[in-house]
């Protein structure tokens, strides 16, 4: 029931966005403007606010992060093979790969962990959420960096000039800059001033609902048949390959039971909404990105159910 309560609102907002597009309230120009607003302001504010307020003390989260990051890299390698087998165009690789590994940790992983630990002691609940936040922070940097690299590599030949273009775009990406800034703020001895914190929080809160409406609008104008096979493959890799790799790699690390619960819930999350926004802004394939998000969200009800039941 906790899984359904978390996923159903996301699907309903997606359908609402599709309806708005069908009725003419959400045209392509407006969708593009919403994406830019979220990409340059909403998501960066959200990232800075969440990372700046995270507690970065303790070492228990390190093996969880290493296991999840390793599973992410492993999934990318598998994704490259699957993309080749599907004979995807080169410019589609970045969008496809991003959909296979970038998990919705903040808006599905964290809420589910809150539900999962709600019936245990206050100390255990606080501990598991502390681990989750400590893992979330560096994974944002990993996700953003790998996503930018994958999307840029789709449009550049490998060579010195291409590598310089990729590196330049990575260091100026607003989501990566926000991740670095938020992490830097989190290790300072002082807290964000309350007015600044509340302002960032308010701006950040608009990111996910606006992104979901845009994704829904994209679905209303996308022929899913053109990329249904690729979207399905990406969704299956996200909700199946990542958890299996995380489970196997996690055995190699000294992870506590609470840490392992965080690892498995995070690994089984569907593709993040931010992947659509980044794909559109970096000349990726928006239709494939939106389809992958929807399919992985539906399929994650199974993967998350299994993970929560077992761990």
Image (cartoon, rainbow, N blue to C red):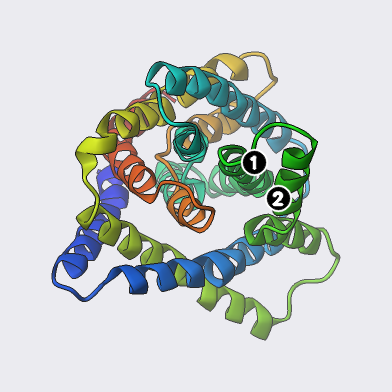
Q: Earlier in the sequence, mark 2 or mark 1?
A: 1
Query: Residue at image x 70%, y 20%?
Result: 254
| Residue at 41% over, 68% down | 32
Mark-to-mark CA distance, 2 and 1: 7 Å
Q: Quadrant of residue 257?
A: top right
Q: Quadrant of residue 209?
A: bottom left
**Which residue is painted at 62% across and 38% down in the image?**
153
Quarter of the picture holding the N terminus: top left
Provide the secondary structure element on which disc 1 rests.
helix
Checking the image for residue 170, the label placed there is 2
Q: Which mark is residue 161?
A: none
Residue of label 1: 149
Q: Depth check: 209 or 303 in front? A: 209
> Would you place residue 132 above or below residue 47 in this image?
above
Residue 221 seen anywhere in this rendered image of the structure: yes
Q: Is residue 308 visible?
A: no
Secondary structure beneath disc 2? helix
- Quadrant of the drawing holding the C terminus: top left
Q: Nearer the viewer, residue 234 or 54?
A: 234
The residue that appears at 47% across and 24% down in the rendered structure is 243
Asked if the residue under mark 1 is in contact with the one under mark 2, i.e. CB atoms within 8 Å, the reply is yes
Q: Position of residue 63 (x, y in %)?
A: 70, 28
Q: How many circles with numbers are drawn on the protein?
A: 2
Q: Is 255 on the left or on the right of 241, as rendered?
A: right
Indicate the position of residue 79 as horizontal and vertical percent values.
49, 24
Q: How many C-alpha atoms fall within 10 Å of the one at disc 2: few (<14), some, or many (≥20)?
A: many
């Amino acid at each position: 029931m906790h899984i359904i309560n978390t996923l159903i609102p996301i699907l309903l907002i997606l359908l609402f966005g599709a309806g708005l597009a069908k009725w003419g309230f959400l045209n392509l120009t407006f969708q593009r403007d919403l994406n830019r607003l979220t990409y340059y302001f909403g998501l960066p504010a959200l990232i800075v606010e969440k990372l700046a307020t995270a507690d970065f003390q303790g070492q228990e989260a390190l093996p969880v992060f290493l296991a999840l990051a390793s599973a992410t890299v492993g999934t990318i390698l598998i994704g490259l093979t699957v993309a080749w087998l599907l004979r995807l165009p080169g410019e589609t690789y970045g969008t496809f790969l991003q959909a296979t590994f970038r998990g919705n940790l903040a808006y599905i992983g964290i809420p589910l962990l809150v539900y999962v630990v709600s019936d245990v002691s206050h100390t255990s609940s606080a501990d598991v959420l502390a681990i989750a936040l400590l893992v979330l922070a560096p994974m944002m940097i990993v996700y953003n960096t790998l996503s930018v690299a994958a999307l840029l590599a789709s449009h550049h030949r490998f060579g010195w000039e291409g590598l310089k273009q990729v590196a330049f775009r990575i260091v100026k990406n607003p989501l990566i800059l926000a991740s670095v800034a938020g992490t830097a703020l989190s290790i300072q001895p002082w807290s964000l001033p309350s007015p600044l914190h509340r302002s960032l929080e308010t701006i950040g809160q608009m990111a996910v609902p606006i992104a979901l409406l845009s994704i829904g609008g994209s679905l209303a104008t996308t022929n899913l048949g053109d990329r249904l096979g690729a979207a399905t493959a990406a969704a299956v890799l996200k909700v199946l390959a990542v958890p299996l790799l995380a489970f196997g790699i996690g055995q190699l690390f000294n992870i506590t039971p609470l840490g392992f619960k965080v690892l498995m819930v995070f690994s089984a999350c569907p593709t993040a909404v931010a992947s659509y926004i980044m794909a559109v802004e970096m000349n990726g394939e928006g239709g494939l990105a939106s389809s992958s998000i929807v399919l992985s969200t539906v399929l994650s009800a199974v993967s998350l159910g299994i993970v929560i039941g077992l761990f």
